[in-house]
Amino acid sequence: MITCRLITEAVAAAYSVPVLQLYSRRRDAGTVLPRHMAWTLASRLTTQSYSAIGRHMGGRDHATVMHGVGKITAALETDAQIATNYQALVDAVTLLADAGHSAERLRQCFNDIDPLDVAERILSSAFRDVLPSMEEIRALCFGVTHYAAECHRLYAEHDGHDQTAADPGLTDL
């Protein structure tokens, strides 16, 4: 499932800016273009309204989001680089959503324990205040292993050859 969060993370990674910078009030070109790109992707790839997109992505109102989407939509017609980046992001977000759907099915194997939630709870607590259960540790290990295998597969696809044949240990996942 494609979400505003997934889009924001993909755009932030593609443009090498922190996610929080996309949510910020900064108006420099290095922030505005990725922010507008994220809004455009969200408006086209999700069912969210402009108001909802604005709320999810930095607390903007619908008119601001609509303006940013309009800027990117116009640029798609005139700027080949923006059009190329846009299509690459659409492909990346779709691929990530498909991978996330697989992870969602796998998560059901662990009684709906989300490895990211477990990691966040552990890392945000004071030292030794949180001890995860064995199920949570298993889910966390499986999540990391699955993520590593998925990254390896995506890199192999990107490079044009299958790296899993070179490393048989990853095919067991």
Image (cartoon, helix red, strand yellow):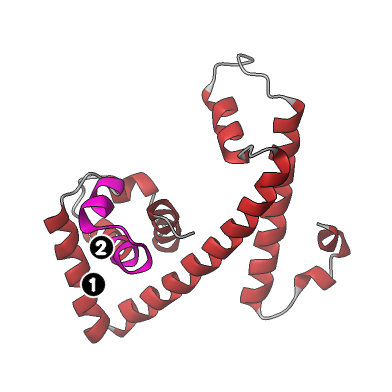
Give percent across and percent down for residue 85: 38, 75
| Mark 2 and mark 1 residues within 8 Å of each other at the beta carbon | yes
Mark 2 or mark 1, earlier in chain: 2
Q: Which residue is mark 2?
A: 36
* Observer-nearest of 55 and 120: 55
Whether 54 is among the magenta residues is yes
Residue 67 in which image quadrant: bottom left
Q: Main secondary structure of the magenta part?
A: helix
Q: Is residue 118 above or below residue 161?
A: above
Range of residues picked out in magenta? 39-56
Mark-to-mark CA distance, 2 and 1: 7 Å
For this view, does 8 lie left or right of residue 111?
A: left
Quadrant containing the C terminus in the rendered view: bottom right
> In the image as oriented, which residue stretches furthest toward the top?
129
**Above or below 72: residue 112:** above
Q: Position of residue 128 (x, y in %)?
A: 64, 15
Secondary structure, mark 2, is helix
What residue do we see at 62% from left, 18% from top? Answer: 130
Write down the quadrant of residue 155 in the picture. bottom right
**At which x and y percent is residue 169?**
86, 59
Residue at the spot x=71%, y=40% of the render?
Answer: 110
- Name the element at disc 1: helix
Q: Which residue is mark 1?
A: 72
Q: Amino acid at mark 1?
A: Ile
Residue 71 shown left or right of residue 113 in the figure: left
